[in-house]
Image (spheres, rainbow, N blue to C red):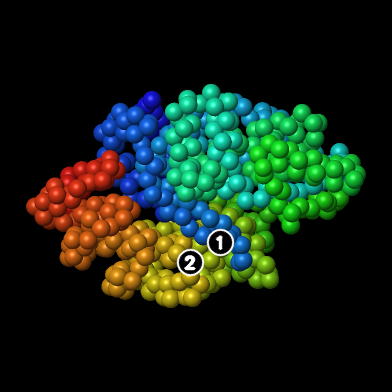
């Protein structure tokens, strides 16, 4: 079985524009494949699906707030491309088995691929979920709020395979997805990767029988991924519904309700809860004004880049350091900061790339670890500015690598170093290169890419003899960096490097042709 070339083409464009997840910097492999264009797509599409053996993924502990964490996976870039292409090609079959969108019961990740690389409907589904819950609760006296414990990591592969088969996905495609999941879970037969955009469709597919079972029992509910709201007339009925759902989850898929998050709220308290959960609830008038400007120019698209030149002088004047600092400090000041909402605001700031947030984000960096990914994306979004003291900003960022909490978490270190790999203006190359010998393999990759970004050819040359002992992620980073070597030296190195797999071959071919 082969995947259609147009599916690979769409997947490649999607990964290049939006990345393989919201948690990691876009791998350079996607950039190289995109540069190779049709030649790479044609060659990949000519391969049988069974020939794509899952490669090594990277797994991290990523913060959710001050004290809670989740595991997140960054797939091998080729696996990410294949998975995205499969979901793009067969996602309509999976979507067709879900509860109808117009029923307004299931709101998360509705399959609707577009020419901008989005797999899912970009409509404000989270707000729609809570707005519908608010309206639906008016006919009931109580609402039950609950979620499924550790959902993505508890999905049984057998259940997923059955649902993919029920959706009439070709058996080879379903088998490849199950093999990929198995390769990530040390052959334990449960768990799907947390992070990749395409994973969301797999999770939604698994919940189809649960949704149908609730509907068949006449239970009124709304669901967003693993967050479920049930509606009841009495407290007794609410308690019965919890037990009924627990029974459904257990018998269907051996899933559990997360006990400490389960709540029964009366109508008034639930209405207040719904209003708190809606994302566009500015913390002060300053944020309301800034968000209105961003939404006006983005037309509601949370992924659209807005150029400052599109704004009027009056609109630009609203983005001053004092205003942005006031907004961020208002979020950080409570004993338990609202990191969900703060991350949302920083993502909006990254859309517009205005530097007004740099000062406060650097000063409060140690309190922003749960928003690390968003903060790093924000710094990248302002990287085209020439009126900033980038070297000093780089010095400040480099100092955070000595922070005790940062040293304890590889994801934090990766996020900071990825900024230097993406932005040459941050400078401080010598300080970064000194870290190489004591760094883990994951961090060494970022240092190699940083050296390439700064054109440190002589330093890179010293690593040539280590190439054969590098892991796959570092081998690919070095092949990318090898494009900087002088032409004859590069040709000789690439000739005898010994590529391991099609992705390394693409990188070597790209490096060989690259004109530096």
Does the rendering let one see residue 157? yes
Contact flag, marks 1 and 2 (Cβ < 8 Å):
yes
Of all residues, the one furthest to the left in this rendering is 488
Residue displayed at 79% across by 36% down? 220
Give the image location of residue 381, x and y in percent. 43, 56
Give the percent coordinates (x, y) of residue 65.
61, 63
Q: Which residue carries the number 2 mark?
A: 409
How far, Cα to Cα, is label 1 from label 2? 10 Å
Q: Residues within 10 Å of mark 1 (few under 14, many from 20)?
A: many
**Residue 281's x, y, as percent?**
68, 54
* SS type, badge 2: loop
Q: How many marks?
A: 2
Residue that label 1 marks: 63
> In the image, what residue occupies the spot 65% across and 39% down?
253
Q: Is residue 310 above or below residue 170?
A: below
Residue 38 pos. (x, y %): 29, 33
The residue drawn where x is 20% and y is 54% is 482
In the displayed structure, 291 sits above or below 128; it is below
Query: In front here: 6 or 86?
Result: 86
Q: Quadrant of residue 82 in the image?
A: top left
* Viewer-proximal residue among 388 and 56: 56
Q: Which quadrant: the N terminus?
A: top left
**Label 2 neighbour load within 10 Å: few <14, some 14-19, many 20+:** some
Using the image, determine if residue 42 lies above or below residue 156: above
Q: Earlier in the sequence, mark 1 or mark 2?
A: 1
- In the figure, 404 relative to 318: above or below? below
Name the residue: 79% across, 31% down.
217
Q: Quadrant of residue 392?
A: bottom left
Residue 204 shows which numbered tag?
none
Q: Secondary structure at mark 1?
A: strand
């Amino acid at each position: 079985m082969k995947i259609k070339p147009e599916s690979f083409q769409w997947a490649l464009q999607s990964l290049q524009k939006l990345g393989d997840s919201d948690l990691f910097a876009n791998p350079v492999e996607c950039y190289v494949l995109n540069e190779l264009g049709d030649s790479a797509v044609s060659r990949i599409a000519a391969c049988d699906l069974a020939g794509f053996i899952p490669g090594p993924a990277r797994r991290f502990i990523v913060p959710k707030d001050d004290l809670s964490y989740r595991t997140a996976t960054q797939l091998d870039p080729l696996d990410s491309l294949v998975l995205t292409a499969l979901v793009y090609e067969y996602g309509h079959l999976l979507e067709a088995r879900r509860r109808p969108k117009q029923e307004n019961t299931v709101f998360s990740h509705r399959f609707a691929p577009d020419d901008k690389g989005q797999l899912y409907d970009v409509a404000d589904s989270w707000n729609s979920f809570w707005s519908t819950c608010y309206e639906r609760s008016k006919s009931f006296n109580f609402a039950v709020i609950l979620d499924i414990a550790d959902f993505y990591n508890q999905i049984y592969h057998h259940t997923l395979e059955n649902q993919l088969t029920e959706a009439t996905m070709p058996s080879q495609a379903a088998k490849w997805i199950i093999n990929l999941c198995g390769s990530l879970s040390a052959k334990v037969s449960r768990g799907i990767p947390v992070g990749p955009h395409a994973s969301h469709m797999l999770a939604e597919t698994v919940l189809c029988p649960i949704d149908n079972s609730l509907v068949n029992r006449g239970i009124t509910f709304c669901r967003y991924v693993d967050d479920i709201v049930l509606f009841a007339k009495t407290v007794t009925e609410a308690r019965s519904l919890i037990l009924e759902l627990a029974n459904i989850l257990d018998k269907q898929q051996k899933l559990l309700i997360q006990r400490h998050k389960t709540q029964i709220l009366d109508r008034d308290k639930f209405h207040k809860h719904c209003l708190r959960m809606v994302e566009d609830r500015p913390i002060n008038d300053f944020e309301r004004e800034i968000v209105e400007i961003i939404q006006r120019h983005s037309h509601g698209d949370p992924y659209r880049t807005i150029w400052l030149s599109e704004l009027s002088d009056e609109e630009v004047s609203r983005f001053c350091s004092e205003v942005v600092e006031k907004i961020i400090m208002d979020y950080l000041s409570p004993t338990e900061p609202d990191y969900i909402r703060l991350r949302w605001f920083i993502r909006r700031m990254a859309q517009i790339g205005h530097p007004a947030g740099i000062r406060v984000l650097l000063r409060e960096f140690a309190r922003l670890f749960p928003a690390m990914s968003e903060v790093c994306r924000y710094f990248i979004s302002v990287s085209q500015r020439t009126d900033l003291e980038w070297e000093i900003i780089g010095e400040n960022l480099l100092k955070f690598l000595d922070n005790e909490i940062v040293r304890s978490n590889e994801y934090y270190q990766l996020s900071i170093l990825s900024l230097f790999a993406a932005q040459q203006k941050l400078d401080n190359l010598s300080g970064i290169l000194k870290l190489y010998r004591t760094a883990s393999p994951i961090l060494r990759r970022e240092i190699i890419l940083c050296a390439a970004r700064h054109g440190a050819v002589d330093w890179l040359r010293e690593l040539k003899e280590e190439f054969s002992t590098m892991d796959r992620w570092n081998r690919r980073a070095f092949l990318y960096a090898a494009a900087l070597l002088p032409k004859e030296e590069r040709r000789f190195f690439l000739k005898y490097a010994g590529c391991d797999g099609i992705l390394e071959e693409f990188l070597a071919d790209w490096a060989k042709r690259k004109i530096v």
